[in-house]
Amino acid sequence: MHVTVTGKNIELTRALKDYLIEKLNRAQKHFEHPLEAMAILSVAKNPSMAQNQTAEVTIKINGTIIRGEESTENMYASIDLVADKIERQLRKFKTKYFQKPNKVKENHVYSIEEEDNEEEFDLDKLELKTVNPNKDNGSPKIVRSKRYPLKPMTPEEASQHMDLLGHEFFMFINKETSQVNTVYSRRDGQYGLIEPEL
């Protein structure tokens, strides 16, 4: 596996990089071809945050984005958790959804995840805006907004990608109606679909 590591508010030591790469390489065993991964290790500047050390990993494979993020008080613990999550998602992807390249009819990129360093890992030109979270007067505020291109797909495909990303909801353009829809995870383990009423 080829891993590109970026640090934010943290010194990327050789020991830290080697530990991350070693942990992520366990997921490579599920695939014959080398995987490309992008990792961001960051420490939040806010001293009031207990779990301020975050490890994010994104892998693009066969037109799909696999992503994991974990935060703890210790970067090595965050790496352990995110590596386990990525391995589970890749195993699920291979057993449920993976098609060998010669059998793929279309190569869709269905989801774009936020990345703060687009120069090293450009996920289709994601625009990301962040506002200062320290300016708080007690009421909830929007602290981050994301823009990404919505891709046409079926609700079943959207559910698969939501599942692989580990999200609770997923917005997409319905192939059949050409309208923006949202799938979401229900408490009973099933999926729901939200469609606009025109």
Image: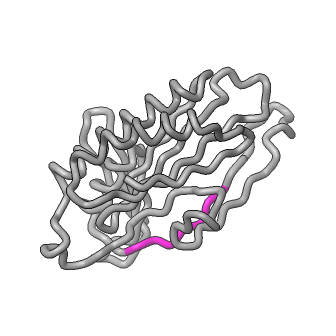
The residue shown at (52%, 54%) is 4
Residue that appears at 65% across and 56% down:
116
Q: Relative to residue 75, is residue 179 drawn left or right?
A: left
Residue 106 colored magenta?
A: no
Q: Can the viewer see residue 194 in this picture?
A: no
Front-most of 19 and 106? 19
Residue at left offset 50%, top offset 72%: 149
Choose between 45 and 151: the one closer to the eye.
45
Q: Picture coordinates of residue 28 (x, y %)?
A: 29, 48
Left or right of 159? Residue 3 is right
20 is higher (above) or lower (below) than 114: above
The quadrant where residue 83 appears:
top left
Query: Which quadrant is home to the C terminus?
Result: bottom left
Residue 138: x and y in percent read 81, 31
Q: Magenta stretch: give its range.
A: 145-151
Specify whether residue 169 is in view: yes
At which x and y percent is residue 3? 47, 52
Which is nearer the eye, 46 or 79?
79
**In the image, is 131 to the left or to the right of 174?**
right
In the displayed orientation, state which residue is furthest to the front. Answer: 14
Q: How many marks?
A: 0
Quadrant location of residue 157?
bottom left
In the rendered image, residue 150 lying in the magenta stretch gets the answer yes
Picture colour scheme: one colour
Up the image or down, 156 lies above or below 101; here it is above
Residue 50 screen position, x and y as percent: 67, 21
Q: Residue at x 63, y 24 (%)?
A: 51
View extreme (left): residue: 103
